[in-house]
Amino acid sequence: MKIGFVLFDGMTSMDFARFYEAITWLAILKAKENVTWAFCADKLEVTDDRGLKMKANEVLPDLGRFDLVFLPGGISTRKLRYDENFMGWIQTADTAFYKVSVCTGALLLGEAGFLNGKKATTNSSAYELLTPYCAEVIKARVVRDGNIITAGGVTSSIDLGLYMVEMLTNSEIALQVQRKMEYPYYQVGNLSDTYM
């Protein structure tokens, strides 16, 4: 499984880091074969919303070659969704099997057209912004509609990571990762189209 983590200026690092911490246990535990990942951006170095600099190891790759593409949120998503070059790149994720977002990363999925007819969620402050992009905004921590999985505000990125681990493997592996992260709030065994 190839995972593409999308990074961009003004992103919220915690959206990314918490999901990254959970999902990469798939490789550490050898719970799934050939799990690899890349940090993808529209330039070599990006700066998050608080000044932290991060380097991408792939600049403007075809996101369709990944099995899972992940988009974090951040205040900059509100403007980035109108950046034609950036959104043209995000649309290359069209053939990625799973498209996943945390927080306002859902606005980018929406602008790319990936949420048409889908249920989705985002940070509670952006429900109105998300509404035009999807069939229904669900007020939940994690929402799955087919192969589109969206999560709410910052802390829900841990729940999303554990949800994806469980969905891609089983509840036993998710419980193992949950214990290693010492995160007591995720409810293993609650895989449905909408996880509250």
Image (cartoon, grey):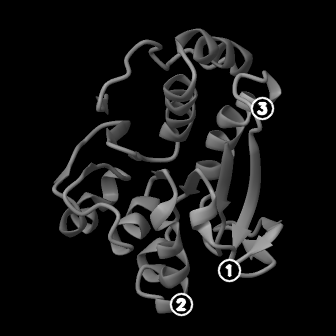
Mark toward the start of the polypeptide (1 vs 3): 3
Residue beneath disc 3: 27
Q: Residue at x 47, y 74 (%)?
A: 91
Question: Are the residues tagged 1 and 2 within 8 Å (C-beta)?
Answer: yes
Q: Which residue is mark 1?
A: 42
Residue reaching furthest to the top: 172
Give the alpha-carbon distance from disc 1 to disc 2, as whole Å.
9 Å
What residue is rendered at 34% in x and 39% in y?
A: 144
At 19% from the left and 58% from the top, the residue drawn is 117
Q: Quadrant of residue 110?
A: bottom left
Q: Nearer the viewer, residue 29 or 162?
A: 29
Assess whether mark 2 and mark 3 are in contact (beta carbons under 8 angstroms): no
Residue 34 drawn above or below residue 42: above
Element type at mark 2 = helix
Q: What separation in Å lies between label 3 and label 2 (alpha carbons)?
A: 33 Å
Could you give the CA–CA distance between mark 1 and mark 3, rounded to whole angstroms?
Answer: 26 Å
Q: Amino acid at mark 3?
A: Ala
Note whether residue 47 is visible: yes
Mark 3: secondary structure: helix
- According to the picture, the residue beneath numbered tag 2 turns out to be 85
Q: Point out the image quarter for the N terminus.
A: top right
Badge 1 amino acid? Asp
